[in-house]
Amino acid sequence: MKQYSSMPIDAYIEELSSKNAVPGGGGTCALVGALGTALTDMVGNLTAGRKKYASVEPEIRAIMEETDKLKALLISLIDRDPVVFEPLSKAYGLPSGTPEEAAVKAETMEKCLHEAASVPIAVMDACAEAIELIARIEKIGSPLAISDAGCAALLCKAAMEGAALNVLVNTKYMKDREYAAQLNSDAARFVAEFGDKADAVYDKIYGRLLRSRAV
């Protein structure tokens, strides 16, 4: 399996543009989330070490430590997504002409669907945490990087909402409807709660920039 996370950007985009099933939306959502956390780190790095922000430096450093962890996780999920998708794509093609074959296919499909859904749920969880951190750093970070904080919030929201679609496309076919309902509920909660938080950060930053005067 290719390591998509280590590909040059242009090569990844070409792979994504192709008719191949991977990379796809799931891994790309992880990439977008990782970009959001990277921008959060950028805000931190433009703030930390400056005398003007000495009083908030410990908090800035703590935020960056957390976003570094989330960034590493999301990068790993870029490569994890095609790994869990490949068995599922093969499972769809299993024979089901006899009761025995149908039973094997159903069991295999269910296991693969659970695995495939685990990645987008992890992406959503990581992006939700990132949005919380962005909301904090927006308040105390350097105004020179305020637009980057807004972009970070938008990217993490987009990654989270895209990942929700990848949860739903897997839970749709699960036989265990109780587990599927739980995953759907988790996805809906992430989108509702943290989507609103990301929007609030964006709206605040947009308003500040709109009101500011050019020097």
Image (cartoon, rainbow, N blue to C red):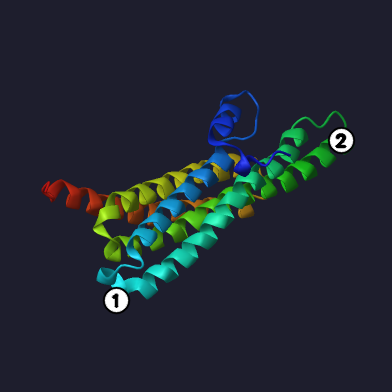
Q: Nearer the viewer, residue 215 or 28?
A: 215
Which percent across, then down, holds residue 211?
12, 49
- Give SS at disc 1: helix
Residue 190 sits in quarter: bottom left
The residue under label 1 is which amino acid type? Ser
Local packing at callout 1 (Cα closer than 10 Å; few below 14, some 14-19, many 20+) is few
The dot on residue 141 is none
The part of the image, by quadrant, that contains residue 102 is: top right
Q: Which of these two is toward me, 214 or 117?
A: 214
Residue depicted at x 79% and y 43%: 108
Q: Is residue 93 visible?
A: yes
Residue 125 in view in this figure:
no
- Foreground mark, 1 or 2, reads 1
SS at mark 2?
helix
Hey, what amino acid is under mark 2? Glu
Question: Is 43 left, or right, of 85 in this rendering?
Answer: left
For marks 1 and 2, give the CA distance. Answer: 66 Å
Q: Which residue is mark 2?
A: 101
In the rendered structure, the answer to whether residue 86 lies left or right of residue 35 reads: right
- Residue at the location (54% across, 40% down)? 28
Q: Label 2 crowding class (10 Å Cα cut-off): few <14, some 14-19, many 20+?
A: few
Q: Is residue 78 left or right of residue 207?
A: right
Task: Tell me the residue that label 1 is attached to.
Answer: 55
Quarter that holds the N terminus? top right
Residue 94 place in picture, x, y as percent: 81, 32
Q: Is residue 89 above or below residue 200?
A: above
